[in-house]
Image: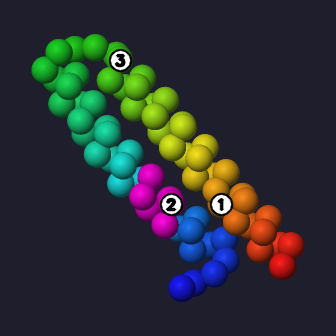
Amino acid sequence: RADGSLTPAAFLALRNDAIGNIAVVLAALMTAVRPSHWPDLVVGLGLVVLNAGAASEVFRTARAEQRG
């Protein structure tokens, strides 16, 4: 098991990127079937929440690492 804040940060960044890519493709398909701005807005807000949670987790891990 790797300790430190960089390992979870890299994992979360890759996870969020994969989820974001899938969500964008799904939003594009939904928009192609029925034109609307809502799929893009929902994906954008979802990515904000997802990345904020990841940033919070990395910050907590880094703070714990800094304390020793």
In percent of the image, x 35 and y 17: which residue is there? 38
Q: Is residue 21 left or right of residue 5?
A: left
Stretch in magenta: 11-16
Q: Position of residue 58 (x, y in %)?
A: 65, 60
Between disc 3 and disc 1, the foreground one is 1
Q: Is residue 22 left or right of residue 32?
A: right
Q: Is residue 14 magenta?
A: yes
Q: Is residue 65 above or below residue 56?
A: below
Q: Secondary structure at mark 3?
A: helix
Is the C-beta separation of discs 3 and 2 under 8 Å?
Answer: no
Kind of residue at badge 2? Leu
Q: Quadrant of the N terminus?
A: bottom right
In percent of the image, x 47 and y 39: which residue is there? 47
Q: Is residue 68 magenta?
A: no
Kind of residue at badge 1? Val
Kind of residue at badge 3? Trp
Quadrant in the picture for residue 18: bottom left
Q: Which label belongs to residue 58?
A: 1
- Which residue is disc 2 drawn over? 12
Q: Which label belongs to residue 38?
A: 3
Q: Position of residue 56 (x, y in %)?
A: 67, 51
User: How far is disc 3 from disc 1 in space, using C-alphas?
Assistant: 30 Å
In percent of the image, x 61 and y 43: which residue is there? 52
Question: What secondary structure predominates along the stretch shown in magenta?
Answer: helix
User: How far is disc 2 from disc 1 in space, using C-alphas?
Assistant: 9 Å
